[in-house]
Image (cartoon, rainbow, N blue to C red):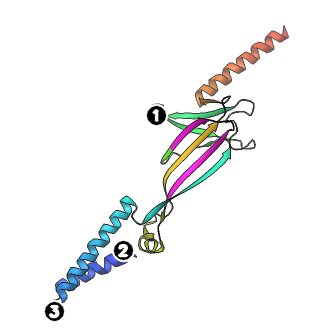
């Protein structure tokens, strides 16, 4: 709607500047002011989410081991220089592959707790009222992601390790199992 108002105001400004007449100057100035206000409104909406508010939703799921059920582990894959981590988690025993966290506008925390669970808090922009939705709805910013936070609460007996460390641990366990089999066969 704001684009339509902008186009009409710009056409009126041009029209009333070209055609001479009484009171045309006033209408030309008024349409120029409306054009400027529309442009400022569009820019403010695009950069500062003017006319919108934030809405936070939260979901909590139980957490099961990322590896095997017998070995309580929360896995992560380091990115870049290792300061950023992509956590891999499962929320059910029947889940074959672990889910990875979303990487867009995200923060993660790992806390110690008595029960393993993951809490995902998602903050999105929504229009503050119907008028703003009518004016700025054409830009498609409704329900745009502002921030997502993953809070992994794990018991003290759980380990947090990288995928590479888990693979090395698996190799070591295989070697020890083979050694024990050879020793028991003798």
Which numbered marker is on residue 136? none
Disc 1 from disc 2: Cα separation: 42 Å
* Stretch in magenta: 107-124
- Local packing at callout 2 (Cα closer than 10 Å; few below 14, some 14-19, many 20+) is some
Q: Secondary structure at mark 2?
A: helix
Q: Badge 2 is on which residue? A: 3
Q: CA distance from mark 1 to mark 3?
A: 68 Å
Q: Residues within 10 Å of mark 3 (few under 14, many from 20)?
A: few
Look at 24% across and 81% down and name the residue there. Answer: 30
Q: Main secondary structure of the magenta part?
A: strand
Q: Is residue 98 left or right of residue 35?
A: right
CB-based contact (under 8 Å), mark 2 and mark 3: no
Up-down: is 2 above or below 124?
Answer: below
Q: Quadrant of the C terminus?
A: top right
Kindly give the residue lying farthest to the right in the view shown: 185
Q: Which residue is mark 3?
A: 22
SS for dot 3: loop
At 36% from the left edge and 78% from the top edge, which residue is drawn? 4
Image coordinates of residue 18 in percent, x first then y, are 17, 85
Give the residue at mark 1: 80
**Labels 2 and 3: the sequence-earlier one:** 2
Of 135 and 77, nearer the camera is 135
Between 182 and 58, the residue placed more toward the observer is: 58
Q: Residue at x 17, y 88 (%)?
A: 19
Tell me, yes or no, whether the highlighted magenta stretch contains residue 155.
no
Say which label, 1 or 3, has the lower sequence index: 3
**Residue 185 location, x and y as percent?**
84, 11
């Amino acid at each position: 709607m704001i684009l339509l108002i902008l186009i009409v105001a710009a056409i009126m400004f041009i029209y009333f500047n070209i055609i001479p007449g009484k009171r045309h100057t006033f209408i030309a100035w008024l349409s120029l002011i409306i054009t400027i206000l529309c442009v400022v409104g569009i820019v403010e909406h695009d950069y500062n989410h003017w006319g919108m508010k934030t809405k936070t939703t939260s979901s909590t799921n139980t957490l099961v081991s990322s590896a095997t059920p017998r070995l309580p582990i929360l896995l992560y894959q380091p990115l870049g220089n290792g300061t950023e981590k992509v956590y891999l988690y499962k929320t059910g025993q029947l889940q074959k592959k672990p889910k990875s966290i979303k990487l867009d506008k995200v923060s993660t925390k790992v806390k110690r707790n008595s029960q393993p669970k993951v809490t995902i808090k998602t903050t999105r922009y929504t229009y503050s009222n119907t008028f703003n939705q009518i004016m700025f709805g054409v830009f498609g910013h409704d329900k745009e992601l502002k921030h997502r936070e993953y809070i992994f609460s794990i018991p003290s007996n759980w380990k947090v390790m990288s995928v590479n460390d888990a693979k090395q641990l698996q190799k070591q366990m295989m070697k020890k199992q083979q050694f024990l089999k050879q020793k028991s066969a003798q």
